[in-house]
Amino acid sequence: MESDVRLEGVTKRFGKVTAVDGLGLEVSRGEFVSVIGPSGCGKTTMMRLIAGLDQPDAGQIWIRGERMEGVPPYERNIGLVFQSFALFPHLDVMANVEFGLRMRGESAQHREEKAMRALRAIGMENLARRRIEQLSGGQKQRVALARALVVEPSLILLDEPLGSLDAKLRIEMQSELKSLQRQMGITFIHVSHNQGEALVMADRIAVMNAGRFEQVATPTEIYKEPRTRFVAEFVGRNNIFEGEVAESRNGIVRVQTRHGVFAIEARGRVPAERQRLIFVVRADSMRPVDAGGPRTENVVSGVIKGLEYAGSVMLMVLDLGSDQELKVEQHESLSLGRAAPRHGATLTVTWTPADAHLLPTP
Amino acid sequence: MRQTHTPPAKAPALEVSTTLVVRRGVAFLERHPGVASLLLVLPGTIWMMLFVGIPLASIVLFSFWRSGFAGLVPDYNVENYAALLGGRTFWRITFWTYEVVIIALAGVIVLAYPAAYAIWRVVRDDRWKTAVLLLCVVPFWTSYLTRTITWLPMFGREGVVNRVLLALGVIGEPLEILLYTPYSMMWGLWSLYIVFMIGPLYHSMTKIDEDVMSAAAMLGATPLRTFFHVVLPLTRPGLMAGSLFVMVLGLGEFFTERVIGGAQNPMLAGLILRQIDIFQWASASAIAVTLTVLTLVTVSAMLRLFDLRKV
Amino acid sequence: MSDEETQVSRREFVHTGLQLGAALGVSGLGGLTIVGEAGAQTKRQYPWESLPAGETVPPTKLQLRTIGLGVSVQDRFLREFERRTGHKATGKVTGLTPMITEWLAGGYRNYDTNETNANRNAALWSAKLLQPIPVDKVVPWKSARDLFTNPKALGHDEVSGWPLVEIWVNPKTQQEFKLVPQFFNCDSIGYRYDLLKEDVTSWGSLVDPKYKGKVGILNDSLLTPGWCAGYMKKNNLAQIKRSDNMTRKELDTVIDFLIKRKREGQFRAIWEDYGQCVNMLASGEIWLADSWNPVVEDVKKQGVVCKYAFPKEGFTAWFHGVAVAKDTPNLQAAIDYVNFCLEGWWGAQVAPQGYYSPTTTCETYLKASKRTDPQGRFNDYEWWYLGGENEEPKKGWPIRGRDTGSFRKRWSNVMHWMVWPDDADYYAKRWNDFLSA
C-alpha cells in the first residue's frame, strides 16, 4: 500500500542550528504514529514542516502521493490539534467546529449537519452555543479535535494534545483519541515528550533526538528492544551497563562489567570476544533475592538511596558504587512476606539472561 | 548626636505623640474602609478638579455671560446658545465636521489595518517593529509651520504627485483637487491620525495567539480570509480604542482644514478661535460647551456600541 | 494689519542675538570700554540714545518686559536696548489677539509694554490696563510725521478720525498718548507678474472671474470683507457708507457677493499664515492674494517675479504702537523703550521688511546704509522711502525700488484704516457663513 505520509531527507535549519536533519519516515493510511523526544529535539519543527507552516531547507514531504513543496498550509487539508487548543476566542463552540467547513465554502445546512454530528461524536451537542471561555480544559480539547476532524482531513497532526490537561483527564482522553482514530481510519501523527501517551496510543513510535530519528518501531519493540542508548534511556525505566565480552557460547553472551560478569541471551548475535558493548535491563525485570542465596550469576547488591511508591509499584534506586545506579521497579505483591525496604538498607537483586538486551550498536 | 540637636525631654514626647496619632489614624481607617478609599482617590480628584473641573465649569459659566469689548460681563442670558443653535451655518458646519471625521476615520482604518498587520506579521525583528512604529509618530515632531508648508511641494500644482502623474502620462494638466479642496485635508488628517489607530490595532494583534493564526490556516483559511474571519474580529478592542482617539481628535480639529483644506470649509473647533479672535469669549465658550457635549454624546454612543471594558 | 513674523527668521534673530550677547560678554570681561555714568552724562543726554559700537552701559535695577509680534519683538532689538540703557529686556512673541487676551486675563501684571495693533488696543484702554504717556516724555516725537499729528495730513481719515483717534487721549490737544506709534504700513495685493502677465491695479482683480481658481484671500473676518467693501463702494457696486465699519445690511451685501464668488470657484485657497502665503505665491499655487508688503518682499527674495499692487481704490492702512501698562514698576524703562523705538535705529531696522517709522529720525541711519540695492546706487532711504527709481507706481518688470512708488505716493492713496468695527461679532458670524458656504 502506498504510504499516506512520506518524509524524505527533510532538513530545516534556523540560522546555524539544524532543527531537523535528514528525516525519513513513512506512515500508512490509518496509522497512528507518535513522535517522541525531549523538548528541543525537533519534533515540533517536523510537525510544522508537515503542516506547511514552515518550509524545509532540503528534502521532500509527500501526503497521499502528492509533493507538498509550495503547497500552502491552507491547501494541505491537514487537521492540526494544538497543545493550546488554539480555539477562536471570538466564536462559540459551533462556529469553531464549523470554521473549516465555512472556509471550504460548504452550505450553511451542510455545515450545521456535519458540525452537529461532530459535536455529538464528542458528546458536546448541548454545548454548541457555549462561548469558548466557558469551557473546561477537556471540553476545549474535544472541540479542538472536532474542529480538526469535521473537515475530513487526510491527516491529523497532534501537537502535545494532552499536555495541558490534568493527569486523570489525560488518561481518559488517550483512550478516547485512540478509539476515535480507529473509527475514522484517519492517519494520526502525534508529537509528544510523554512516552506513556505514545506507548498507549501509537501503532508505531518514532523516537527523536537532536533532529534525527533514533528508532522507529512498534511500542513493544521500542520498549523491549531499544536500538540505541538514547532510546533505552528515554523510553521506559532501563538500567544500562557497559562492558567487554568475556565469553559468547550456547546462545549466551557473558559480559565483564565493573560490577561483575553478566549473562545475556544472545538472540542470534555472536559478538567477538573482548568487544565492548552495552546492554540494557529493564527496572521491572529486577527480582530481589536473599543475599548469599543459590543464584550466583546476574546478582548485584546495592544500598537503597531512593524510594518511591507509585500506586501498586515501588520504585527504588540502588547505589552500586563506582557511580552506577540501578533502578528497580517492584510490584507490591512480590514484596509480600519480605521486610519493607528502607533507606540505607542493602538490597540484592537478580535477573534472567532473557531479561537483558544487547544494544545493536555500542 | 541627637541630644546635642534637640532638647532630650521634648523629642521623645513628640515621637510618642506622632506614632500615637499615626496608630490611631490607621485604626480609624481600618474601621472605616470607606473613608480610607476616599482618601486614596482624593489626590487624583483634587488634580482633576483643579485642571479639568474648574476650567470646564468656568467655560460653562461664561457661556451664559455676555462679551464686552474688553472682557466678560456677568449678565446671564442664553443668547449665545440661541444665536449659535438657531443659525443654519452652525448646523452645516456641524454636519460637515462629522462628515470629515467619519471619512477620516474610515480612511485611517483602511490604511492602519494593513500597516499594523505588516508590522505584526512581516516585520520580524523587534527593533525594526519599534522603528516603524516610531516613524508613524514623526508628523507630530514637525512644527506648526513645517506642517503648514510641506503639503505644497507634495500635492501642489508643481508638487511631486503632479509631476509624477504628468511624467507617467496619467494626466495632461496638473491636478488641483489634491490641495485646498474640501476633501484634500484628508492627506493631513490621515497622516496625523493613523498612528492613533496603528498603535491600538498593533497592540490588539500582538495579543492574538500565534497558534490561532496557524489554526485558521490549517482549517483552510487563506491569509486574506484569516484576516477577515480571525484578525478583524479579534482586534475589535484596538479598532474601538483607535476610533475613539480619532473621533475625539477629529471633532477638535480645525488647523489641518485651514492649511491643507484651503480654509474654505471650516470645522466646529475653528469657530471657537474665530470668536476669541474678536474677543467674543462668551459665545466662544458656548461653542466650546456645545462641542464638548457633542463629543461626549458621540463617545458614549460609540462605547454603547462596543464595551471596551469587556476586553 | 501686520504679519506674524516667520519662525525661521525668528530663529535667525535669536542666533544673531546670541552672537551679539557673546560679543558683549567678551568686551565686558576685557573691561574695554564701559561707559561710566559720568561719561554717559556728558556724551549722551538720554539713556536710549545711540552708543558707539563695543560700549555697554552697566545694568540698572530696572527691567523691560514686553510682548508683541515677531516683527517688533526681536532679540537683536532687545539686546541693543539693553546695551544702550542697562535695563534688562525680555520679550514674548505671540499673535495679535493672544497678546491682548493674555493682558485682559490678568497677564498685564507680568509686562511693562504691549506692542499692539492699534485696532485692538482699545480693548486694553477701555479695560483701564494702560497708562497715558505725556508727549514731552517721548523726545523723538518732535520729528513725528504729519500723519500722526496733523488731521490734514495725507492718509488721515476724517470720518474715522484715524490714526489720531487711537494715538491720543485727546487728539485735539495731543498731550498724552494712549498708544505711541511704533511702525506702520498699508496692505494691498501681492501678485505673480510673470503668471498674470499684467499689472494688478484694483482690488477687483481678486474677485475678477478672469482669475478664477488662482486667488488666495486672507482668513480674517474683518479685513477681507473690508477691502471687498472698499472695492464695491469705490466702483459703485453697492451702497456702502463706511467700508471700514459697515452696518449689518452693508456687510450682508458684501458677504453675499463673496459667497457668490466662492461658489463659482474664484478662490483657490484661504490663507492663514504668513509663511503659507509666501509659499503659495512663490510656488505658483496662487497667482494673486490680498497680502502684506513683507510677504511680497520675501517672495521676491526667492528670485520669483512678484509685485505689490497699487490699487486704484487705495490701500488699507494700519499702525502698531507701544502701550504702557498701568501699574508697571518699570515706568522709566518703558518710556526709555518707547523713545528707543522712535530714536531712528529701530525704524531703520524694520524698513527693509517694508515697514515705515512714525518719526523721520530713521533717515540718518538709512541714508548711511546701502544694504538693499544690489547695484549699490540707491541708499536704503532712497530705496524704501523714496521708491528707488520709482517715485510713481511702477508698471511691468523689472523694478528697482518699491514697486508702489514713494512714501508720499502710497500715503496719498489710502482707502481706509483698519478700525475695529462696531459690530465685530456680526462680521465673525457672516464670515463663518462665507467660509462654510
Image (tube, helix red, strand yellow):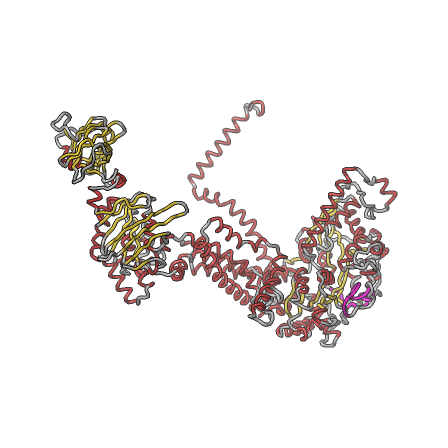
What are the residue bounds of the magenta stretch? C396-418
As for residue C412 lying within the magenta part, the answer is yes
Q: In this view, does C253 lie to the left or right of A202?
A: right
User: Which x, y percent locates residue A231?
Assistant: 26, 41
Query: In the orientation shown, which residue stands out farthest toward the front?
Result: A272
Q: Where is residue A340 in the image (x, y as percent from the top left)?
A: 17, 29
Residue C396 is left or right of residue A190, and the answer is right
Decide whether residue A17 is among the magenta residues.
Answer: no
Magenta part, dominant SS: loop
Residue B44: horizontal and vertical position, in percent?
A: 51, 46
Q: How many marks?
A: 0
Quadrant holding the C terminus of chain A: top left
Query: In this rendering, does residue A170 appear at all?
Result: no
Q: In this view, does B83 lie to the left or right of C330?
A: left
Of residues B26 and C63, the one nearer the viewer is: C63
Question: Which of A169/A281 is in front?
Answer: A281
Q: Please say if B272 is above or below B43.
A: below
Taking the image as shown, residue B281 lies to the left or right of residue B190, namely right
**Quadrant location of the N terminus of chain A in the rendered image:** bottom left
C217, A100: nearer the viewer: A100
The quarter of the displayed image where residue B77 is located: bottom right
Across and down, in percent, residue A266 comes to 17, 38
In the rendered image, the residue lying farthest to the left is A294
Residue A135 visible, this angle: yes
Return the residue nearer the eye: A207 or C283: A207
Where on the picture, by quarter, is residue B275? bottom right
